[in-house]
Image: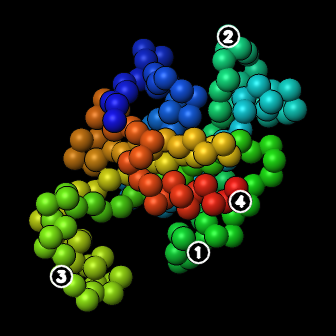
Amino acid sequence: MSNDSPSSGGAPMAASPLTRACLEIDEYASGLGWDQPARLFALVDTARLRSSEPRLASQLGLDTDDAGKTQLTPIEQDELPAGTPLDKFLGTVAWPDAVAGCALTVERLMLPPSAEATVPSGMNEKQLAKWVAAHPERQEVRLTVAVLRDGSRESAVRLREKDSANEVLTGAGLVPGLAEALAATFV
C-alpha cells in the first residue's frame, strides 16, 4: 500500500496513470462530500480522446499534450439506478472498445479484521448490514476502484474520520471483490 499526496497543483502524484485516475476520482468524490450515491466512470485514453473528440477534450481542459505521457481521463456516467443492487447493476454494464477501463466510487461501512471473529452466524444480508451499522468499531469509508481492460487494478480507500488527501490509502489489492466485478464488465 502507498499513501500518495496531491502535488502543489492539486492533481494527485502517483506512479501509474491508473493510480492517478483513481486518486483523481477520489478527490472529485471528496469534493462532493459524504453520503453520496455510488458513481461509475469510464476511463479513456487521453491522447485518443484528444484526437477523436477534440471539442470534448477542449471542454474537459485536455487540449494540451502532457509531455506525451499515457493518461487516463475519467468520464462520469449516468447515475446508477436507485434501488438496484450494485452487483446486479454491474452485471448489465458493457463498454465500447474506446473505453480503456472503468472505475467506481462507493461508500461503505467497514469493520477491522479483529471484529471478524465476533460476527454472529446465520444472519441474512439485511441483518448483517444492521449489525455492522451498530458495531462500535465500524468505520465509514469511500472506496474508489479502477480497472483496465488489460487486468490492471487500483484502489483508493478514504476513511471518513481521516478525510484528507494525505490519508488516502492506495493499492491494487485493497478491494478485490469490487475489482473483480468491474473487470467482469469487460468480458
Q: Earlier in the sequence, mark 4 or mark 2?
A: 2
Q: Amino acid at mark 3?
A: Pro
Check contact, mark 1 vs mark 4: CB within 8 A.
Answer: no
**Between marks 1 and 3, how big is the CA–CA gap?**
26 Å
Residue drawn where x is 23% and y is 72% of the image:
132
Residue bearing mark 2 = 67
Q: Secondary structure at mark 3?
A: loop
Quick one: label 3, few (<14), some, or many (20+) residues within 10 Å?
few
Residue, disc 3: 120
Residue 187, label in figure: 4
Q: Are marks 3 and 2 in contact (CB under 8 Å)?
A: no
Q: Nearer the viewer, mark 3 or mark 2?
A: 3
Badge 2 element: loop
How was this image coloured? Answer: rainbow
Lower sequence index among marks 3 and 4: 3
Placement of the N terminus among the 4 image quadrants = top left
Name the side, left or right, on which 22 lies relative to 164.
right
Front position in the image: 166 or 88: 88
